[in-house]
């Protein structure tokens, strides 16, 4: 199957590093024009844009904090001003503020909810109008296996990632008649700054024991699934949750 996204424009949140960076590069390699959103890592976002444009693609970097709803219209406008349309929204940006619930501060709950859930809901809402105009749209949101199973020390994060699944199904139902699909991906343990910060060697070994495929995932493993869900090849798939986890959730 050859996936061709030429003529499409994608907005990828949190695309300066990690999974979002790999998604931006993969969508660009498939022909989409890409808006590389970042919060603070400007140089890294510019490097992603340089890689995309050097390969002959179209890309811009746009700063914007997804937890700040006031930035959303600017993000959408920057996308449509640069490329004339918005077809694909990848809600990838996400944060952790881990602690046991007994010790978790209200700020840690608010920050994670605002970025991982409220921000996704309001940015998706803002993205629907240009997609409805095109009579075509793809929304892919980055949940987590932790949203399926829960995790001690991540009650705030797990709640947002589980919340995204219900949100995705609701948007899928509301938008089906408009030819806009919404799906969620649940990555397993993927090698990025996020996991490097949280994982001791011991935790890493324990995680590996639970992965039937015998390795941690790469950002490219996730990006491949995103490109498929963002394409015409996935036209009959909506409201679904796809675990890309090396088989972790079978246990
Ligand atoms: P990461 O390495 O920590 O990178 C996070 C990215 O999100 C960065 O580009 C960062 O931009 C951006 N970001 C953070 N807060 C933002 C905000 N408020 N507004 C805009 N951008 C923001 O994370 P990752 O591991 O690639 O994870 C990406 C997504 O996958 C997250 O939603 C995460 O929950 C999910 N996930 C990851 C794993 C895993 O094992 N890594 C597993 C399951 C799910 P700046 O650098 O500019 O701040």
Image (cartoon, rainbow, N blue to C red):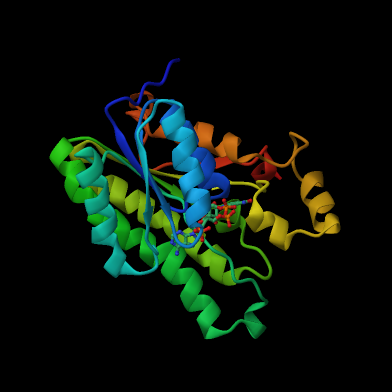
**Vertical relation: 127 (above or below) 107:** above
Residue placed at 77% from the left, 50% from the top? 207
Judged left or right of residue 219, residue 92 is left
The location of residue 118, given as percent across then percent down, is: 37, 67
As drawn, the residue found furthest toward the top would be 1
Quarter of the picture containing the C terminus is: top right
The location of residue 102, given as percent across then percent down, is: 65, 84
Quarter of the picture containing the N terminus is: top left
Residue placed at 52% from the left, 84% from the top? 106
Residue placed at 26% from the left, 51% from the top? 78
Asked if one can make out residue 61 in the rendered structure from this viewpoint, the answer is yes
Residue 32 or 216: which is nearer the viewer? 32
- Which image quadrant is residue 147 in? bottom right
**Vertical relation: 27 (above or below) 90:** above
**Vertical relation: 116 (above or below) 184:** below
Residue 36 or 159: which is nearer the viewer? 36
Residue 3 or 229: which is nearer the viewer? 3
Residue 59 or 127: which is nearer the viewer? 59
Asked if one can make out residue 27 in the rendered structure from this viewpoint, the answer is no
Judged left or right of residue 159, residue 179 is left
Counting the numbered discs, the total is: 0
Residue placed at 66% from the left, 75% from the top? 99
The location of residue 171, given as percent across then percent down, is: 29, 51
The location of residue 246, given as percent across then percent down, is: 67, 37
């Amino acid at each position: 199957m050859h996936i061709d996204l030429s003529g499409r424009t994608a907005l990828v949140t949190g695309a300066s590093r990690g999974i979002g960076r790999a998604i931006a590069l993969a969508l660009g390699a498939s022909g989409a024009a890409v808006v590389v959103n970042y919060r603070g890592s400007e140089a890294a976002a510019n490097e992603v844009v340089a890689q995309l444009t050097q390969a002959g693609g179209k890309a811009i970097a746009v700063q914007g904090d997804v937890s700040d709803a006031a930035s959303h219209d600017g993000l959408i406008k920057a996308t449509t001003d640069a490329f004339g349309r918005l077809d694909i929204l990848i809600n990838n940006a996400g944060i952790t503020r881990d602690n046991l619930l007994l010790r978790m501060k209200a700020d840690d709950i608010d920050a994670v909810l605002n970025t991982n859930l409220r921000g996704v809901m309001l940015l998706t809402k803002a993205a629907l109008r240009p997609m409805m105009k095109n009579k075509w749209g793809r929304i892919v949101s980055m949940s987590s296996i932790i949203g399926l199973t829960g995790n001690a020390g991540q009650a705030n994060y797990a709640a947002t990632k589980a919340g995204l699944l219900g949100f995705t199904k609701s948007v899928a139902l509301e938008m089906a008649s408009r030819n806009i699909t919404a799906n969620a991906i649940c990555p397993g343990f993927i090698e990025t700054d996020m996991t490097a910060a949280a994982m001791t060697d011991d935790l890493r070994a324990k995680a590996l024991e639970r992965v039937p495929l015998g390795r941690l995932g790469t950002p490219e493993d996730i990006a491949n699934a995103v490109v498929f869900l963002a394409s015409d090849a996935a036209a009959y798939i909506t409201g679904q949750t796809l675990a890309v986890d090396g088989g972790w959730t079978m246990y």
